[in-house]
Image (spheres, helix red, strand yellow):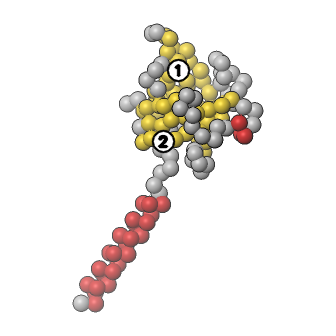
């Protein structure tokens, strides 16, 4: 009888610990690597290790810019820095962005070019925010 009670309490405690751990591990951010599209001619391809491509479609052609990125999910909202553009209108600039995850398959982003992190937007403006969807 004592063993059954001990086993029941042990199972209950184990379940409680697992439930608390899953709450603590709930992601504030999702995996960014992969291809994302705004469905209006712009695609971002984030590669492991911080490299990325920004594709802009003009008819059947793409303009491609290679750049570096760093995502910081410890900030609220998550911060995304885009830098080292090899060509295009952002060459020589650092873009400070904020993200808001809609789900694991979509996020919205707002960015501002700037010389300092203080240039990072503080809030999402509907007219200056781009929504991206994961491309399967």
Question: Is 6 located above or below residue 120 in the figure?
Answer: below
**Residue 136: % across, % down:** 37, 30
Q: Quadrant of residue 81?
A: top right
Q: From the viewer's perspective, is 12 left or right of 49? A: left
Residue appearing at x 64%, y 37% in the figure:
121
Which of the pair 98/37 is nearer the observer?
A: 98
Looking at marks 1 and 2 on the same chain, the residue that comes earlier in the sequence is marked by 1
- One can see residue 20 in this view: yes
Residue appearing at x 66%, y 22% in the figure:
90
Q: Are marks 1 and 2 in contact (CB under 8 Å)?
A: no
Question: Is 69 located above or below residue 73 in the figure?
Answer: above
Kindly identify which numbered label has been placed on residue 101: 2
Labels 1, 2: front one: 2
Q: Quadrant of residue 68?
A: top right
Badge 2, how many Cα within 10 Å: few under 14, some, many 20+?
A: some
**Residue 97: % across, % down:** 61, 36
**Residue 64: % across, % down:** 56, 18
Q: From the viewer's perspective, is 115 left or right of 55? A: right
Residue that extends furthest to the left in the rendered view of this protein: 1
Residue appearing at x 26%, y 84% in the figure:
4
Residue appearing at x 66%, y 18% in the figure:
89
Which of the pair 5/131 is nearer the observer?
A: 131
Give the total of numbered labels.
2
Secondary structure beneath dot 1 equals strand
């Amino acid at each position: 009888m004592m063993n059954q009670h001990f086993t029941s309490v042990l199972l209950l405690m184990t379940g409680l610990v697992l439930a608390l751990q899953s709450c603590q591990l709930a992601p504030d951010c999702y995996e960014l690597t992969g291809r994302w599209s705004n469905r209006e001619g712009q695609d971002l391809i984030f590669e492991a290790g911080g490299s990325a491509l920004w594709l802009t479609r003009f008819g059947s052609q793409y303009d491609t810019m290679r750049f570096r990125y760093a995502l910081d999910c410890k900030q609220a909202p998550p911060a995304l820095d885009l830098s080292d553009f090899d060509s295009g209108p952002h060459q020589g600039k650092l873009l400070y962005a904020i993200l808001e995850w809609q789900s694991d398959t979509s996020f919205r982003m707002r960015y501002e070019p700037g010389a300092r992190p203080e240039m990072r937007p503080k809030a999402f403006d509907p007219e200056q925010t781009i929504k991206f969807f994961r491309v399967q």
